[in-house]
Image (cartoon, rainbow, N blue to C red):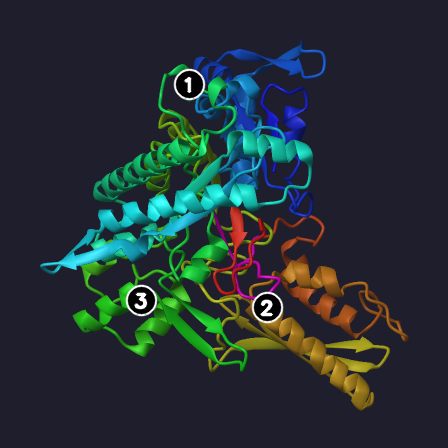
């Protein structure tokens, strides 16, 4: 995570440092915003840029213009996020040790220099009981698990080996732990509560208040037996004359990409990314995975069928699918069914009862405007969030969440889909002949919804080896296209590959068979619209694929997460 204060002299360069998707890909970045800056934005005033080394004013900028630049860049490709530094430091339990300047990569854990925090999450879906045919939360069992989890996390501090003595001293001086939750969306499904409802906000408020209260009680009990954290005398708890705590912080809402897959539950406090999806297994079978609560309801209500589950897997959401009762559609909403305001309100409901911070992504539709992004930032600040990350569908060159059947080449689709699209029985297309050093190459391209879907390449009178390699290139290009890779990206990879027998023909020098295929694709889909690979703004249809299992990954909790194999960009 790279965070720069909004009053740093380099702030404008920092805001745009990831405007090209091929730069700083191993960094999450956020702008650290102060209350003074937000007040200057509201009043239309200016604010000072401060040299951090000399602590002197360098110049002043119009706060509104900087804020708008931040908003526009986030709208453009999701980066940077925003961190509310003063809000974060109001909850700093040990201000005498310094101010909090940054967080871990997903933004949920504010930390001092040389500090670390041990995190863990409870699967809320396991705490639902049914009495008199009404589902309810088993708070007594939840209390027991919260106390055990706090004890366990405290133990991990002493059992861990830290890379530097300074880290060891700081961690053991504050003993921060971050107990969080996952499976919240599954819990709401079982309770029959729509995620985007006041009832869901109430459930979040009551549930996290309970976890917070019990976690602090468990820490006080540990302090009575084991002693308080070493820096307790200089903490805010000591100043407030509160009972000693074993841990400076107790709760965090962290990303649970890998954890939630292991636990077979929804991730963190996010809505479900899809109710059904297709999982590829090792023997190349394609098996639909359906949310178990939704499947149970579908069977109970009599509208379950394998064909319906497959249709849902293609779309992810059920909102536009016929044959599903309206009350079921109301409850079983997915991330892109929830409007941005509800994402922020849910984050704020959990933040209200969380010592550290909340990792969450506010999903925006592709047609959202920069002004919509600003409204999200303003709302997050007003509701007391410690930071916020947005992602507008289709805004990254490697889109991380797919949405629907496209309206044309390069347009986004409307439902979450699997990484490799099924082939319709009949497709239209075209065949082009192009001369190469190995003979005439015939390139056939089929199209689906106005964009290339498959490439078949054959070369005449050139020998079996060349024929086989040509077929292989076509197969791999077809797989890439069906997986949502943009034409521009394929052209970039193939164009310019040199072979043993380059040849001049109309349009220039053809270097090789892959170069020839690239020329056909470029001429048809890029140059005909006056767009070249160098100047084209790319939005993929299907989404980027996981480097581990090649399935589509989603963007949530400030990170890229694969729900198929557990890979997460943020570790």
Camera-side residue of 183 and 123: 123
Q: Is residue 114 visible?
A: yes
Separation of residues labelled 1 and 3 (CA atoms): 47 Å
* Image quarter of residue 276: bottom left
Residue placed at 80% from the left, 65% from the top?
507
Query: Most extreme residue toward the right, as rendered?
Result: 500
Camera-side residue of 362 and 485: 362
Crowding near the residue tagged with mark 2, few <14, some 14–19, many ≥20 C-alpha atoms within 10 Å: many
SS class of the residue under badge 2? helix
> Would you say 548 lies left or right of 562 here?
right
Question: According to the image, label 2 marks what residue?
Answer: 481
Question: According to the image, label 3 marks what residue?
Answer: 292
SS class of the residue under badge 1? helix
Q: Answer above or below: position of 34 versus 286.
A: above
Question: According to the image, label 1 marks what residue?
Answer: 238
SS class of the residue under badge 3? helix
Q: Which one is closest to the eye, mark 2 or mark 1?
A: 1
Crowding near the residue tagged with mark 1, few <14, some 14–19, many ≥20 C-alpha atoms within 10 Å: some
Query: Most extreme residue toward the top, as rendered?
Result: 56
Camera-side residue of 246 and 493: 246
Please tell me which of labels 2 and 1 falls first in the chain.
1
């Amino acid at each position: 995570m790279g965070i720069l204060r909004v009053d740093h002299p380099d702030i404008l360069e920092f805001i745009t440092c990831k405007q090209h998707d091929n730069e700083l890909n191993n960094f999450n970045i956020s702008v650290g915003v102060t209350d003074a800056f937000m007040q200057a934005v509201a009043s239309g005033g200016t604010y000072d840029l401060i040299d951090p080394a000399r602590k002197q004013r360098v110049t002043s900028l119009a706060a509104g213009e900087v804020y708008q630049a931040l908003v526009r860049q986030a709208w453009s490709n999701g980066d940077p996020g925003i961190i509310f530094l003063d809000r974060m430091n109001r909850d700093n339990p040990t201000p005498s040790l310094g101010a909090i300047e940054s967080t871990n990569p997903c933004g949920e854990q504010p930390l001092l220099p040389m500090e670390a925090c041990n995190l863990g999450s409870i699967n809320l879906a396991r705490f639902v009981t049914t009495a008199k045919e009404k589902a309810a939360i088993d708070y007594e069992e939840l209390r027991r698990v919260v106390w055990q989890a706090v004890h366990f996390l405290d133990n991990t501090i002493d059992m861990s080996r830290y890379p530097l003595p300074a880290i060891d001293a700081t961690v053991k001086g504050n003993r921060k732990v971050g107990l969080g939750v996952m499976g919240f969306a599954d819990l709401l499904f079982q309770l029959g509560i729509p995620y985007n409802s006041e009832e869901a906000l109430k459930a979040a408020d009551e549930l996290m208040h309970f976890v917070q209260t019990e976690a602090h009680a468990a820490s006080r009990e540990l302090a009575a037996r084991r002693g308080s954290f070493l820096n307790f005398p200089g903490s805010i708890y000591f100043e407030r004359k509160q009972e000693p705590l074993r841990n400076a912080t107790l709760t965090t809402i962290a990303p649970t990409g890998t954890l939630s897959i292991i636990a077979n539950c929804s991730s963190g406090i996010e809505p479900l990314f899809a109710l059904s999806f297709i999982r590829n297994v090792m023997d190349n079978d394609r098996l639909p995975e359906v949310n178990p609560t939704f499947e149970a309801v579908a069977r109970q209500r009599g509208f379950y069928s394998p064909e319906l589950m497959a249709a849902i897997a293609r779309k992810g959401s059920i909102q536009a699918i016929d044959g599903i009762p309206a009350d079921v559609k109301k409850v079983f909403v997915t991330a892109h069914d929830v409007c941005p305001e509800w994402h922020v309100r849910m984050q704020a409901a959990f933040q209200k009862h969380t010592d550290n911070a909340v990792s969450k992504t506010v999903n925006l539709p592709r047609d959202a405007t920069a002004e919509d992004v600003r409204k999200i930032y303003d709302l997050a600040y007003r509701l007391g969030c410690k930071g916020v990350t947005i992602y507008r569908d289709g805004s990254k060159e490697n889109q991380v969440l797919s949405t629907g059947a496209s309206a044309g080449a390069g347009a986004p689709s409307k439902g979450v889909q699997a990484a490799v699209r099924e082939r319709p029985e009949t497709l239209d297309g075209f065949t082009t002949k192009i001369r190469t050093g190995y003979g005439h190459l015939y390139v056939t391209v089929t199209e689906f919804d106005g964009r290339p879907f498959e490439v078949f390449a054959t070369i005449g009178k050139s020998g079996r080896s060349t024929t086989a390699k040509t077929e292989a290139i076509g197969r791999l290009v077809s797989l890439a296209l069906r997986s949502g890779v943009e034409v521009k990206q394929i052209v970039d990879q193939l164009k310019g590959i040199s072979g043993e027998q380059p040849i001049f023909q109309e349009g220039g020098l053809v270097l090789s068979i892959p170069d020839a295929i690239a020329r056909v694709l470029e001429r048809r889909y890029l140059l005909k619209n006056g767009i070249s690979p160098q100047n084209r703004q790319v939005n993929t249809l299907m989404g980027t694929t996981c480097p581990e299992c090649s399935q589509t990954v989603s963007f949530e909790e400030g990170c890229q997460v694969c729900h198929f194999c557990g890979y997460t960009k943020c570790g």
